[in-house]
Image: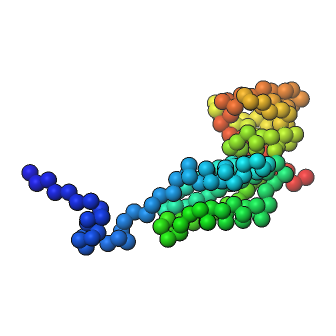
Amino acid sequence: MCNFALSLGEICSRGLLSPILLPEKMITTESITELVEQYIEGSDIFLVEVAVKAGNVITVHVDRPEGISIDECVKISRLLNESLDRDVEDYSLEVSSPGLGGAFRVKQQYEKNLGRDIEVLYTDGMKVKGKLEMISDNGIILRVNGDNEEIGFEEIKTAKAIISFN
């Protein structure tokens, strides 16, 4: 039996593998989250979601109770670009608001939509629409057909604002 092992560096230095074929360094969701959270600490900006997909495609969604401005997204984008090295970590970056019709991912999105109509899909598949009346640490109170319905966060599969152009 032949036991022959070379490190990746040795393989490249001997000309057996082109450095172009080496896997690029992966940027982690945790590292991006940490950078954004440090930047927004003490402000009313909140982090909704960070996604890092194959090929270092980075998507960051941030918001504020009264809505996030393009200028604030640009500042966060610049911070991330200054913190990452494009020569070492080839990546693409998008910093934006989560959008109007997306599912709520954090408690602050419920708070932002207090008093508005939302749609809740329960984990069992049942769907209800109503006015978001109250938010607690454990769940929400939704006004459905004149009655208050208590819904625990663990019962909610998805919740999103109902967009009305009336």
Rendering coords of residue 120 (x, y %): 73, 37
Residue positioned 26% across, 65% down in the render: 10
Asked whether, in this view, residue 85 is left or right of residue 135, the answer is left
Q: How is the image coloured?
A: rainbow
The correct choice, above or below, for 146 with respect to 54 in the image is: above
Rendering coords of residue 94 (x, y %): 64, 63
Residue positioned 59% across, 62% down in the render: 83
* Nearer to the camera, 81 or 141: 81
The correct choice, above or below, for 31 with respect to 154 in the image is: below
Residue positioned 62% across, 54% down in the render: 35
* Nearer to the camera, 97 or 8: 8
* Nearer to the camera, 115 or 149: 115
Residue positioned 67% across, 51% down in the render: 38
- How many numbered tags mark residues here? 0
Find residue 17 and report its image quarter: bottom left
- Asked if residue 150 can be seen in this view, the reply is yes
